[in-house]
């Protein structure tokens, strides 16, 4: 069963599988429509486990990340994730005949994860209805057998909800953080769950390691070797040299491949930076970013500082200064780097994986929820706080 595998497998093996999966992914990853999503690494994680196949069969090149999850799709996700096989004889509901998810729905019902959608009769499942965040909490709490509510009342907007107890249990398990980062005092129980959000919920619940894919390959025709106007990057740059700071404006996406920057790279709020094989003399600085990726033997002469945004990934790079990642809501990946200073990962809420780094300074982690996972880090200084065992 996948569940026993999730609960019993060693962390080293999980991380090895994730590393291999990353290496095998094509540029841009499994799907073509989730590039730049803060949930992309989690989408890749559930795809690697066979939990999702895509949304446009038979090609299945798309994931449809912004589409709401239907109750039928939820059944398929959970049945694949937990390897339910018993359908209890089938045909438990009257309204799913002919649905491609009917067998999954029957298995989910037999496992006790769903009872129906029209109590007290409960002879219907409503397979085409969207799943709300409150309903999602109930599905996962039943599937994962979460019982600890951590004292309850984690959020201010679910008082009186029939799902409040499930929501509190989900929060205590570290599967949900809230819906209004960075405060995260609300859960939004009546909001629809999107497919990309569900990927993150499943990744956390199953203890999977997020798998950041290689950045999309820019074609020769779309990769510019011309210096950007005003040193502002809003597209793709190849092997050019910038003799000053380079800025990624708010909301823009900048793809650097083999680019040299003699100053700093500054990523504005809502912007995305993909930096592969770059050389930056100064710092890489992001505040409120959508996503920052630094990988593929990149060199940064100063610090990598990423805060108050969404996703961040620093891998297979040489960072002369510090890696400082703080108060981000997306997935954090710090792996296989040589770091001249400290790695500091603090107050992040999207999950962090820190593995196989060589650090001349300290490895310091505080106030992350959930706590970082990883291992294999060689640290000349101290391993402190939540990273003491990594």
Image (cartoon, grey):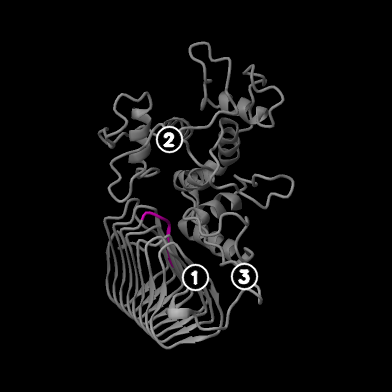
> Does 304 appear in magenta?
no
Say whether disc 1 or disc 2 marks the residue closer to the N-terminus.
2
Tell me residue 188's x, y (percent): 37, 36
Q: Position of residue 43 (x, y in %)?
A: 54, 51
Horizontal and vertical percent position of residue 319 = 39, 79
Q: Is residue 305 above or below residue 310?
A: below
Marks 1/2: CA–CA distance: 33 Å
Secondary-structure class at tag 3: loop
- Other-residue count near label 3 (Cα within 10 Å), few / some / many at <14 / 14–19 / ≥20: some
Judging by the rendered image, the residue that carries numbered circle 1 is 234
In the image, is residue 390 above or below residue 101?
Answer: below
Residue at 49% of width from left, 53% of height from top? 39
How much space separates mark 3 and mark 1, taking CA atoms?
Answer: 16 Å
Q: Badge 2 is on which residue?
A: 191
Q: In the shown orientation, is residue 346 left or right of residue 350?
A: left
Q: Residue at x 49, y 44 (%)?
A: 202
Q: CA distance from mark 2 to mark 3?
A: 35 Å
In this view, the residue farthest toward the right is 58
Range of magenta residues: 329-334
**Dot 2 lies on which element?**
loop
């Amino acid at each position: 069963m996948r569940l026993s595998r999730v609960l019993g497998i060693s962390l080293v093996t999980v991380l090895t599988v994730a590393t291999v999966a990353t290496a095998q992914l094509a540029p841009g990853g499994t799907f073509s429509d989730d590039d730049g999503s803060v949930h992309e690494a989690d989408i890749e994680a559930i795809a690697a486990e066979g939990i999702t196949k895509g949304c446009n069969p038979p090609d299945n090149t798309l994931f449809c990340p912004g589409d709401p999850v239907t109750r039928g799709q939820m059944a398929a996700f959970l049945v694949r994730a937990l390897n339910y096989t018993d359908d209890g004889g089938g045909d438990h509901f009257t309204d799913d005949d002919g649905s491609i998810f009917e067998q999954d729905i029957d298995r989910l019902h037999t496992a006790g994860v769903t009872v129906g959608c029209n109590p007290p009769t409960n002879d219907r499942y409503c397979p085409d209805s969207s799943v709300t965040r409150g309903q999602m909490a109930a599905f996962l709490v039943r599937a994962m057998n979460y019982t600890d509510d951590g004292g309850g009342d984690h959020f201010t907007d679910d008082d009186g909800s029939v799902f409040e107890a499930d929501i509190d249990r989900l929060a205590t398990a570290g599967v949900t953080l809230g819906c209004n980062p960075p405060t995260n005092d609300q859960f939004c129980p009546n909001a629809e769950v999107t497919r990309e959000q569900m990927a993150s919920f499943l990744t956390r619940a199953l203890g999977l390691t997020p798998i950041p894919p290689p950045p999309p390959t820019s074609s020769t025709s779309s990769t510019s070797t011309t210096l950007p106007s005003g040193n502002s990057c809003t597209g793709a740059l190849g092997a050019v040299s910038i003799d000053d700071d380079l800025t990624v404006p708010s909301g823009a996406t900048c793809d650097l491949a083999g680019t040299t920057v003699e100053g700093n790279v500054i990523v504005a709020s809502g912007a995305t930076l993909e930096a592969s094989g770059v050389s930056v003399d100064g710092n890489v600085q992001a505040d409120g970013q959508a996503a920052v990726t630094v990988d593929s033997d990149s060199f940064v002469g100063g610090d990598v500082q990423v805060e108050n945004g969404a996703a961040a990934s620093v891998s297979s790079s040489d960072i002369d200064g510090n890696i400082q990642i703080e108060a981000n809501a997306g997935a954090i990946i710090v792996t296989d780097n040589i770091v001249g200073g400290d790695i500091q990962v603090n107050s992040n809420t999207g999950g962090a994986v820190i593995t196989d780094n060589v650090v001349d300074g300290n490895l310091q982690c505080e106030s992350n929820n959930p706590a970082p996972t990883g291992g294999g880090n060689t640290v000349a200084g101290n391993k402190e706080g939540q990273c003491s065992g990594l």
